[in-house]
């Protein structure tokens, strides 16, 4: 009987999954790659599906190449854009920043180019359906799709992206940050309340104005911190942290503050120091004892995020205009209670140090508080894989437990199955794994790992695939 090589599945077609699939199809021309995506469009994800030109990338275009070995790839692509795209490209003293939707088009073209470069062989196959289960099957997996179809695969890469939190506001007036419904008909006498004051909040305010809401907007978070803005930076050497600073979060912070002071004396600033940490941040995170990692998450994470994940200067200017005109108010408080009333939600906020709660009548509530923890996820595929014992949360519950080569660890502590992950699901393992400059390198490394592992797997007779799976099931 003829033999065939089973495909490898990549589940999720945001940046992580798209780049993993592209690299896999290039490095394994003899084996097809099945790219599964439940959303309407591939290579977009939530981040790049927007058409709002005010939704800018928070990383300079110079750092947004999809390929680690071609650092100017995205910049050269932008140079070929036409006049219709000028509104989506902003040049500032801090660098060039492109709209998220334009970057989505860039990724889409990369995917289409890979599809067209197949030389007649179906090396990359797009599956527009949700993957809902993976069950072990004869040295591989049986992949089940929401539509009921199954596929036999030699291995799978989980590239699910950021998980939504299942703990959003319980109110009939709660809406998604990405809800496109026009809001021009809402009266201006009551505010919209946004939970969270990070980058998603900035994009949400821009979207609300784009959708026609003219009233006041309130944003609330525990610390009330806004992302810092990008500014021109000068190169700074990678800080040489002493051993004691690598084992203790307070000692590390003292060292970095001193390093920022040295940078300031030399004509740079803290941004140069933070940027210089990119190459060593994973090692620093992994070197911290678990107790110190938890200390970081409790006490430092919010402050780190606003300095590490900065907003483009035009976004910062927009935010300041909104605040200066009194249309946007940022509060340092927590939500005590939410009660739905006729036409609005009554929200009780308790500010830091306040004797009692304050009352806000919100027309709508938007949860922009950030991503969910995998330990709490309601994602169907991940819940089933945990039930099967094929994966487990990392020690912090942020993402999935994995080895250095991105292989997922099962509930018994073993990493012997052909199951991998990359992107935000590695947050607890790597910490710095959500930005394009991090993921693009991981995608290339992952492809080499997968190709090496599957090259050792024997080809199977095509007529025996379904029989073997049914026997295992």
Image (spheres, helix red, strand yellow):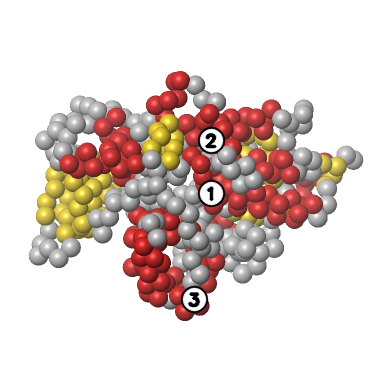
The label on residue 75 is 2
Residue depth check, mark 1 versus mark 2: number of the one nearer the observer: 2
Q: Is residue 462 visible?
A: yes
Residue at x-position 39% and y-position 65%: 262
- Please tell me how many numbered marks the rendered image carries: 3
How many angstroms separate mark 1 from mark 2 (CA)?
14 Å
Q: Nearer the viewer, residue 277 or 42?
A: 277
Mark 2 Cα-neighbour bin, 10 Å: few <14, some 14–19, many ≥20: some
Mark 3 Cα-neighbour bin, 10 Å: few <14, some 14–19, many ≥20: few
Q: Which residue is mark 1?
A: 437
Q: Furthest residue to the right?
A: 1
Q: Nearer the viewer, residue 2 or 273?
A: 273
x%, y% of residue 348? Answer: 16, 54
Asked if the residue under mark 3 is in contact with the one under mark 2, i.e. CB atoms within 8 Å, the reply is: no
Q: N-terminal of the two: label 2 or label 3? A: 2
| Quadrant including the N terminus | top right
- In the shown orientation, is residue 154 left or right of residue 420? right
Residue depth check, mark 1 versus mark 3: number of the one nearer the observer: 3
- In the shown orientation, is residue 215 left or right of residue 235? left
Q: Is residue 149 above or below residue 445?
A: above
x%, y% of residue 78? Answer: 52, 30
x%, y% of residue 358? Answer: 11, 55
Q: Which residue is mark 3?
A: 242
Q: N-terminal of the two: label 1 or label 3? A: 3
How many angstroms separate mark 1 from mark 3 (CA)?
26 Å
């Amino acid at each position: 009987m003829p033999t065939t090589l089973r495909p490898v599945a990549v589940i999720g077609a945001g940046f992580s999954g798209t780049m993993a699939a592209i690299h896999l199809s290039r490095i394994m021309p003899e084996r097809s790659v099945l790219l599964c995506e439940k959303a309407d469009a591939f290579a977009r994800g939530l981040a790049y599906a927007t058409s709002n030109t005010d939704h800018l990338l928070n990383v300079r275009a110079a750092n947004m190449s999809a390929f680690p070995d071609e650092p100017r790839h995205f910049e050269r692509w932008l140079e070929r854009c036409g006049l219709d795209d000028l509104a989506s490209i902003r040049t500032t003293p801090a660098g060039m920043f492109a709209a998220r939707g334009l970057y989505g088009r860039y990724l889409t073209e990369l995917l289409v180019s890979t599809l067209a470069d197949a030389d007649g062989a179906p090396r990359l196959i797009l599956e527009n359906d949700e993957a809902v289960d993976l069950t072990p099957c004869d040295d591989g997996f049986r992949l089940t799709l929401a539509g009921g179809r199954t596929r036999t695969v030699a291995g799978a890469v989980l590239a699910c992206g950021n998980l939504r939190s299942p703990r959003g506001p319980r109110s009939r007036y709660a809406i998604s940050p990405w809800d496109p419904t026009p809001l021009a008909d809402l009266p201006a006498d009551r505010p919209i309340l946004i939970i969270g004051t990070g980058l998603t909040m900035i994009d949400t305010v821009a979207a609300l104005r784009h959708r026609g809401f003219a009233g006041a907007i309130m944003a609330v978070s525990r610390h009330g911190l806004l992302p810092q803005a990008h500014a021109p930076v000068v190169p700074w050497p990678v800080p040489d942290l002493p051993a004691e600073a690598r084992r203790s979060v307070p000692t590390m912070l003292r060292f970095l503050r001193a390093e920022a002071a040295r940078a300031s004396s030399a004509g740079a600033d803290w941004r140069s120091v933070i940027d210089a940490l990119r190459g060593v941040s994973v090692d620093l995170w992994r070197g911290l004892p678990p107790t110190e990692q938890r200390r970081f998450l409790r006490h430092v994470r919010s402050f780190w995020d606003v300095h590490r994940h900065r907003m483009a200067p035009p976004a910062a200017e927009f935010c300041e205009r909104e605040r200066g005109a009194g249309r946007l108010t940022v509060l340092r408080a927590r939500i005590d209670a939410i009660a739905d009333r006729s036409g609005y939600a009554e929200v009780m906020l308790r500010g830091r140090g306040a004797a009692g709660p304050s009352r806000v009548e919100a027309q709508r509530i938007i949860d922009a508080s950030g991503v969910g923890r995998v330990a709490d996820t309601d994602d169907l595929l991940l819940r089933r894989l945990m039930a099967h014992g094929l994966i487990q949360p990392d020690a912090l519950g942020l993402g999935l437990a994995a080895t250095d080569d991105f292989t997922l660890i099962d509930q018994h502590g073993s990493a012997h199955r052909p199951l991998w992950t990359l992107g935000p699901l590695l947050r607890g393992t790597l910490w710095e794994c959500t930005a394009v400059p991090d993921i693009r390198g991981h995608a290339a490394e992952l492809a080499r790992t997968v190709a090496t592992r599957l090259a050792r797997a024997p080809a199977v007779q095509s007529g025996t695939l379904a029989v073997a799976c049914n026997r295992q099931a």
